[in-house]
């Protein structure tokens, strides 16, 4: 019997972003299950290039809105006239063409929380215009939803938001993003990482990765840490290099894009995810798996998993962030035990098992639907 065929679609299937990492895990799960894999992607991790059929995707070099609006055309061009037993898309532009669509974000939900681009300047203004264009384009795709497509949500939070905005798809379920295996930093690694990222500071180091993007909630942290000189704020992410808040002078450092997140997490006593809207936030699991307790807001999809397994704390309205940071820093062993439970419950293996169950369900349904037609054709002969 021939292998079932699968096509996975995303601009990058690699370590380049959170979604790219999930797409790569999806490919590996299907390979382990014996499927024949094709991928439509511009970027493909070198470890997969000799294991899959790479249908190279054209992506315009500049302009996020241009990339977004042309994606459907270029994806269909890459697919050509090929057919597959299952098509799994990670991009909303082709959700209606897919058997499985994995939803990672809703621009409309971010818009309703007033957390799209808000920085001053011409570049930020152009970014806002692009976000608004994507907002309306994304709305069109979700409002003409294909009822045959099986949607996977990365959290209950995202499923609730989708239902609120567009109604609940008839075929859907939550498939939570996986947590990496625990790899707790030892004392020597922590000291080296602290020296690398912070330098000399004897207080608690609170880490954050999200840059100066409004949606990521960095302004809430800056406000909450005023007057708490015992807490050093280590800030990373896009456009953050050299960023300074005068109110945190002497106990804050911004390092820009972080290419070695494992070392960054090891430098931190506590990690905060203060997002105004984040459907999951893979950094929650990554930091916990590195042995750093996590504090997250109620607008972070992974908070439910974090609290269920006691790997961190919730930062709710009215709470003192400084008090939560001190509490988390003083109970690392407790939260590390929770991180082990989190990693086991949301393991990459469990994620793969659940995903393959979805593929198998779709494959069975297609074969069942095809059986009467095949029988009728045989009878006609």
Image (cartoon, helix red, strand yellow):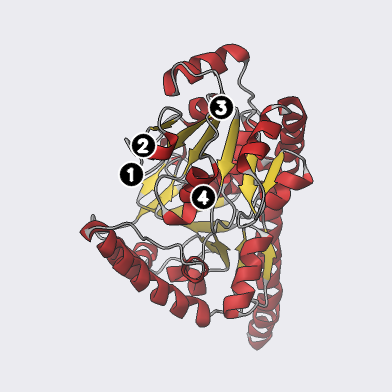
Circle 2 is placed at which residue position?
Answer: 256
What is the spatial separation of the Cα atoms under label 1 and label 4, in whole angstroms?
Answer: 17 Å
CB within 8 Å, label 2 to label 1: yes
Residue 173 sits above or below residue 376 on the image: above
Q: Work out whether residue 192 or residue 260 is closer to the camera in this orientation and state it.
A: 192
Task: Name the N-terminal-most of marks 2 and 1.
Answer: 1
Seen at 54% across and 59% down, the residue is 104
Is 37 displayed left or right of 338 in the figure? left
Seen at 33% across and 36% down, the residue is 241
Seen at 61% across and 38% down, the residue is 322
Q: Quadrant of the N terminus?
A: bottom right
Seen at 72% across and 29% down, the residue is 336
What is the spatial separation of the Cα atoms under label 2 and label 3, in whole angstroms?
Answer: 23 Å
Closer to viewer: mark 2 or mark 3:
3
Circle 4 is placed at which residue position?
Answer: 220
- Crowding around mark 1 (Cα neighbors within 10 Å: few <14, some 14 to 19, many 20+) is some
Circle 3 is placed at which residue position?
Answer: 230
Q: Position of residue 111 (x, y in %)?
A: 46, 69
CB within 8 Å, label 2 to label 3: no
Circle 1 is placed at which residue position?
Answer: 239
Closer to viewer: mark 2 or mark 4:
4
Residue 69 sits above or below residue 40 on the image: below
Residue 177 visible (yes or no): no
- Crowding around mark 4 (Cα neighbors within 10 Å: few <14, some 14 to 19, many 20+) is some
Q: Quadrant of residue 204?
A: top right
Q: Position of residue 329 (x, y in %)?
A: 66, 29
Looking at the rendered structure, the secondary structure element under dot 3 is loop
Q: Work out whether residue 298 or residue 336 is closer to the camera in this orientation and state it.
A: 298
Q: Work out whether residue 11 or residue 235 is closer to the camera in this orientation and state it.
A: 235
Q: Quadrant of the C terminus?
A: bottom right
């Amino acid at each position: 019997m021939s292998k079932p065929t699968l096509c996975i679609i995303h601009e990058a299937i690699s370590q380049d972003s959170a979604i790219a990492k999930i797409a790569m895990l999806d490919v590996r799960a299907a390979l382990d299950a014996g499927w024949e894999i094709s991928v439509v992607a511009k970027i493909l991790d070198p470890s997969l290039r000799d294991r899959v059929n790479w249908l190279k995707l054209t992506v315009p070099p500049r302009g996020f809105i241009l990339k977004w609006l042309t994606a459907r055309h270029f994806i269909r061009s890459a697919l050509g006239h090929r057919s597959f037993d299952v098509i799994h898309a990670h991009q909303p532009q082709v959700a209606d063409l897919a058997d499985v669509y994995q939803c990672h974000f809703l621009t409309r939900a971010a818009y309703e929380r007033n957390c799209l681009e808000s920085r001053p300047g011409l570049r930020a203004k152009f970014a806002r215009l692009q976000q608004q264009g994507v907002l309306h384009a994304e709305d069109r795709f979700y409002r003409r939803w294909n009822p045959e497509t099986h949607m996977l949500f990365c959290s209950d939070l995202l499923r609730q938001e989708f239902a609120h905005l567009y109604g609940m798809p008839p075929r859907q379920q939550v498939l939570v993003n996986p947590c990496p295996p625990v790899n707790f930093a030892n004392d020597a690694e922590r000291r080296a990482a602290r020296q690398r990222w912070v330098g000399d500071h004897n207080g608690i180091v609170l880490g954050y990765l999200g840059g100066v993007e409004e949606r990521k909630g960095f302004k809430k942290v800056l406000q909450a840490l005023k007057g708490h000189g015992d807490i050093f704020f280590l800030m990373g992410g896009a456009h953050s290099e050299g960023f300074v808040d005068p109110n945190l002078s002497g106990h804050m450092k911004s390092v820009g894009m972080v290419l070695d997140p494992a070392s960054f997490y090891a430098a931190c006593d506590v990690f905060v995810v203060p997002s105004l809207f984040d459907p999951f936030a893979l950094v929650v699991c990554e930091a916990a798996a590195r042995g750093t307790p996590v504090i997250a807001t109620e607008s972070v999809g992974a908070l439910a998993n974090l609290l269920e397994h006691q790997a961190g704390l919730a930062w709710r309205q009215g709470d003192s962030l400084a008090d939560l940071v001190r509490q988390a820093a003083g109970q690392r062993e407790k939260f590390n035990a929770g991180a082990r439970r989190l990693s086991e419950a949301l393991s990459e293996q469990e994620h793969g098992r659940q995903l393959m169950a979805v593929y198998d369900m779709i494959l069975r349904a297609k074969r069942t639907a095809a059986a009467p037609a095949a029988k009728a054709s045989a009878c006609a002969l």
